[in-house]
Image (spheres, rainbow, N blue to C red):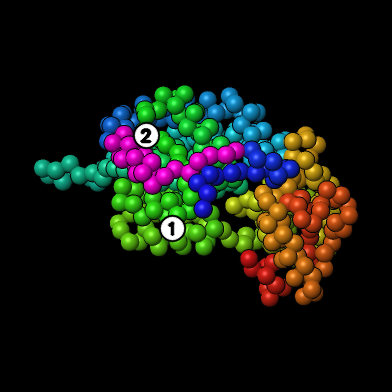
Amino acid sequence: MSNIQRTYSPIDGSLCAERFYASRKEAEKALHRAKEAQREWRRVPLADRISVCRRFAAAMLAKKEDLGRELTVQMGRPIRYTPNEIVGMAGRATAMCDLATDALAEIELGPKEGFRRFIRREPHGVVFTIAPWNYPYLTAVNTVIPALISGNSVILKHSPQTPLCAERMAEGLREAGLPHGVFQYLHLSDHEAEWVVGEKLVDYIAFTGSVATGLAVQGEALKRVCGVGLELGGKDPAYVRADADLDYAIENVVDGAFFSSGQSCCAVERVYVHSDVYDRFVEGAVELTRKYVLGDPLQPATTLGPMVRTSSADFVRVQIQEAVDQGARPLIDETEFPASKPGTPYLAPQILVDVDHTMRVMRE
């Protein structure tokens, strides 16, 4: 297996990043460095830890346009939207800073003669965060910032599709004054990532991704005493009630289904509509879907970019065709989206009706 990680842009297949995978020895050194740095970091007053994270949020926000463009190149979301992820990341980081003092305060358990009884929250130690490519900043910040504020050190393994996001977060934290070794990133092969998950120097694992990989992470972590947090994939439904504000429902369900080419942790993947409003909802959803502009995500007019890779688009194509073969009815004519082409990650949006739960498109 090659020891080089290569990232190809879904926009045109060009190479946009090339990094060496960390060796076992390098990964082990990083873990020891994180363990040592955490001993000092946990002693830093909470207010100072919060201040570092606030400065990080400000530093990243100041670069939102450049970071947004770089993100578009890596994973294909239209550039009109990607800077907003940086805004969202900074907002989440700041919100967690605002909550931290109360959230981490000692819990008094009430009087008892001769005693002061309380619960004090202690850091885990070294947190290993495995982040996905679809919202690479938002999903990573969800664990990185609370871990740092709480006095942990963090090692981030980002998706090989968005490796530059880990590097930019490291730059932002350095700019914010975070001590050396408290936050590190590692570009890891699957084999070495599995080794880190099972390594006794790791005290907590935070994983966002597929169910299959989540099961593997949990299985490896069960071999020892280690905290694990998993955010895994699902088949998210939406339900439109008879009394729903239909215009609002159409706008939000369609956006929930197609934003970022449907590649969201909380994307709407199936829709159940009350019979009283079914026809009007479907008509409105089709009309709105036809307004999407599929194309080069670096163009400001584009509202729907490519999927992250051709294999992902092909998986959707197969699901659609299987459903149609089993009786589902497609309502969108792909020819309305000239950029949609077989053998590429560019895929037209589609709405299927007359579906049922025997179809894979409704279950996976």
For badge 1, the amino acid type reads: Val
Q: Position of residue 161 (x, y in %)?
A: 59, 45
Q: Nearer the viewer, residue 115 or 239?
A: 239
* Residue placed under numbered mark 1 in the picture: 217
Q: Magenta segment: does it hold 21?
A: yes
- The residue positioned 42% from the left and 55% from the top of the image is 194
Picture disc at residue 182? 2
- Left or right: 358 in relation to 334: left
Q: Quadrant of the C terminus?
A: bottom right
Residue segment shown in magenta: 17-37
In the displayed structure, would residue 338 be above or below residue 33? below
> What secondary structure characterizes most of the magenta part?
helix
* Quadrant in the picture for residue 320: bottom right
Q: Position of residue 72 (x, y in %)?
A: 67, 38
Q: Position of residue 345 (x, y in %)?
A: 73, 51
Question: Is any part of residue 34 visible from this angle?
Answer: yes
- The residue positioned 34% from the left and 52% from the top of the image is 199
Alpha carbon separation for disc pair 2 and 1: 23 Å
